[in-house]
Amino acid sequence: MAMKRFADVDAYIEHHEQWADGLDALRAAIRATDLEETVKWGAPCYTHAGKNVVGMAAFKDYFGLWFHQGVFLEDDLGVLINAQAGKTKALRQWRFTRAADVKPRHVKRYVKEALALAREGREIKPARHSQLDVPPELAAALDKRKKTKTAFEALSPGRQREYSQYVSEAKREATKASRVEKIVPMIEAGVGLNDKYRNC
């Protein structure tokens, strides 16, 4: 299933009515800094000199901020979490379940620190893998479907790797086959396997 796209941040907030007050509060705090507002991967993203600094997103049970280089933040309030411990090196999340929990002065302080780190060039760059191992089951499906193969080749190396790992990690052949069938429409739609978790 393709991710819902939003023309701007107003449309994103309007769509997530449940968290609108909280998202508005976060947005106001971020916009009080020098970060530039845009939409990337279907969600609000705030950048400096073209670099992603902080993202904002809403889910069923919470809304929050994603600091792209959050590992470097002091986090004196102890609010940041690593949603994928062992996998995610730099990204850190700050989750909220009520608009009343958003304290603009604290949010602004964290965002300003993140901006200062971006200006200094502090970052952990994603590891680059030299070779992509496409499992035979996925390779066979791509060979049969020209449209899918073209779409797969247009994906970023990271998204190609996610799909390949998703299929190869299945133990049973039947599971591998069902996973291939599941991801074909996603590949053709030009989205990544984990795009819904990628919020900027």
Image (cartoon, rainbow, N blue to C red):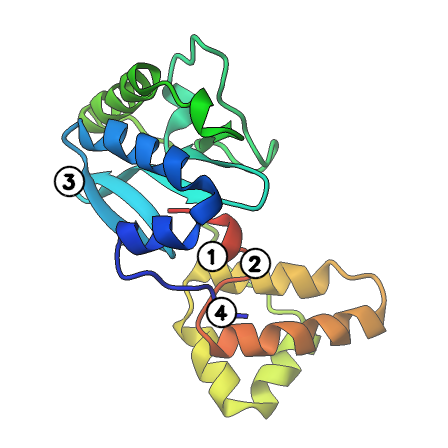
Is the Cβ of the residue at disc 1 closer than 8 Å to that at disc 2?
yes
Question: Marks 4 and 2, how far apart in space?
Answer: 16 Å
Which three-letter amino acid code belongs to the residue tagged 2? Glu
- Callout 4 crowding tier (Cα within 10 Å): few <14, some 14–19, many ≥20: some
**Quarter of the picture holding the N terminus:** bottom right
* Secondary structure of the residue carrying numbered label 1: helix
The residue closer to the viewer here, 81 or 131, is 81
The x and y percentages for residue 197 are 52, 49
Which three-letter amino acid code belongs to the residue tagged 4? Ala
- Who comes first in sequence, dot 4 or dot 3? 4
74 sits to left or right of 169: left
- Who comes first in sequence, dot 1 or dot 4? 4
Q: Decide if residue 127 is in sight here.
A: no
- Callout 1 crowding tier (Cα within 10 Å): few <14, some 14–19, many ≥20: some
Location of mark 4 (residue) = 2
Quadrant in the picture for residue 15: bottom left
Q: Nearer the viewer, mark 4 or mark 3?
A: 4
Question: Marks 1 and 4, how far apart in space?
Answer: 18 Å
Which three-letter amino acid code belongs to the residue tagged 3? Ala
Q: Nearer the viewer, mark 3 or mark 2?
A: 3
- Who comes first in sequence, dot 3 or dot 2? 3
Location of mark 3 (residue) = 49
Q: Is residue 191 above or below residue 112?
A: below
Question: Marks 3 and 2, how far apart in space?
Answer: 28 Å
Is the Cβ of the residue at disc 3 closer than 8 Å to that at disc 1?
no
117 sits to left or right of 179: left
Location of mark 1 (residue) = 158
Is the Cβ of the residue at disc 1 closer than 8 Å to that at disc 4?
no
Which residue is depicted at the point 39% across and 12% down? 74
Which three-letter amino acid code belongs to the residue tagged 1? Gly
